[in-house]
Amino acid sequence: MNDRTNFRGPPERTMETLFARLALTLAQPLGGRLIQPVLDLMMSTLARRHPDAFERMAELGEADLLVDPVDLPAAFLLHVGERPGLKVCDRATQANARVRGAFASLLDLFEGRIDGDALFFSRDLTIEGDTELVVGMRNSLDGEDFDLAADFGALFGPLANLPLRRPLTSLAGTLIGLHEVLLAPALRRLEQVERRLGRLEEGKR
Amino acid sequence: MASFELICPAGTLAALRAAVDAGADSVYVGFRDETNARNFPGLNFSRKELRQGVDYAHARGKQVFVAINTYPTAGNAGAWHRAVDDAADNGADAVILADLGLLDYASKSRPKLRLHLSVQASAANPEAIGLYRDAFGVRRVVLPRVLTINDIAKLNAEIDIETEVFVFGGMCPMAEGRCSLSSYATGRSPNRNGVCSPASHVRYETRGSKLVSRLGAFTINTFDEEEPAGYPTLCKGRFTTHDKASYLFEEPTSLNALHLLPDLKAAGVKALKIEGRQRGKAYIAQVVAACRDALDRFDRGQSYDATALDRVTEGGKDTAGAYGRAWR
């Protein structure tokens, strides 16, 4: 039997998860005005540093992939094709396909640090919609050696080399733990409601 | 001298590098078209990438094989011929073929190119293997995953070319190259188009807490909330017969024969193959490293962990497949 906890994000991802959660929480009231220029800069940086991967993605045709990190307050809509783009969106947004999982797992998958099939087998990753798009996307990314810290670190110049990673990671872990303790009762209630709805839905079939 | 040669899969250049770095003796790859049996979207090698991969492997004393193991359609063998020529011109150490016509072409037009017989040819008796050796100069046969260890030992006693068998990865329970289940469901043939259960025909649906996998018009499986999932292949589908849902052919599971290394050596096997060109480079690195470690320990007479890879298997389970099959 599989040990599902094996596929959860490694500890160093707590920093990225907290940062993304904070950024999305703060940015949501302002719509896309604050965060869109950052996402555009990220995409143009990746396209410049990894042209082969973007060329392979362009071959997949024009399509939208909803990337849904279950532990963040919003989802991302990735447009692939001739002019790829990334934007924050509501998780109910319509797309050709949807990939759902913990933010840390999705980051690991993007960087090729974890096997997508194993995540799928262990049910830590859910995919819906156009499977061909998801498989093509996964293969296009996996053929490239992405390292987001290095890719975006270049944007910060000498600041990228400051020895802050370990203390910040530790602080982030503490904050996430606190955040989860505070949210736990509400999340449990939400899960109960989801299960009840699921049972009702199955009963209708 | 090592007991076995370790043959590892790669669907991308990054995966090839991961396999070589993790301890592969040889890596097998395919071109980005229907000439190979892992024709998945976004996967496989361009000619330029093959050259880069060969250079990377050769610089480290490793080999690269190119699988050209689907069957050309009548009168349309051009892409397959070009694949053989380009593999040879880009420094491949061997090509893995299944089709008789293509073997004939390769043996005549590229007489110095080493030929391996693909598992897709399903050659499982001395007469068939002898024909491939005599007619085309085939040097190695990849045996189908339907033979027991005793079958392999008997076969090796009667043939004089190398045998390669699968040791870990996806578990195809059918006579490979002859299975039409996926073609029946999707209209696209794994043996001609190069992909079993093509992603274009696969859909996953979440129904309440259950995950439903579908292939074409067929429901393949329904997984409960905590149940590990599997690939949407018909041979591993769960179907209802006589009001009872069960796996009629095979469960979602992966092959793991690492605990059978002593038996495979005694049976005369030359090379062990890992399945999985469609898997990510993280999987390749992990599986190749674990198999390398097991083989090295086996050669030193030390015990080794045959269960180290349980967490990456399909359905969270593994099997010795036909090697240890107790027939129902």
Image (spheres, helix red, strand yellow):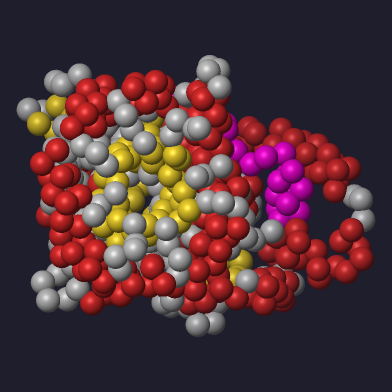
Horizontal side, residue A144 vs residue B241: left or right: right
Say which quarter of the image contains residue B257.
top left
Q: A30 or A24: which is nearer to us? A: A24
Q: Residue at x 63, y 32 (%)?
A: A185
Image position, residue A77 (x, y; %): 54, 67
Say which quarter of the image contains residue A26.
bottom right
Image position, residue A198 (x, y; %): 37, 40
Image position, residue A83 (x, y; %): 54, 82
The vertical placement of B8 against B36, above or below, is: above
Q: Quadrant of the C terminus of chain B?
A: top left
Residue A9 lies in the magenta stretch: yes
Asked whether residue B140 is in view, the answer is yes
Q: A8 or A20: which is nearer to us? A: A8
Q: Residue at x 16, y 51 (%)?
A: B134
Could you tell me what secondary structure mostly forms the magenta stretch?
helix
Image position, residue B166 (x, y; %): 34, 38
Asked whether residue A137 is in view, the answer is no
Q: How many marks?
A: 0
The vertical placement of A161 against B224, above or below, is: below
Q: Residue at x 54, y 29 (%)?
A: B296
* Residue placed furthest toward the left: B242
Q: B148 or A177: which is nearer to us? A: B148
Q: Which residues are magenta?
A: A1-23
Residue A15 lies in the magenta stretch: yes
Say which quarter of the image contains residue B237.
top left
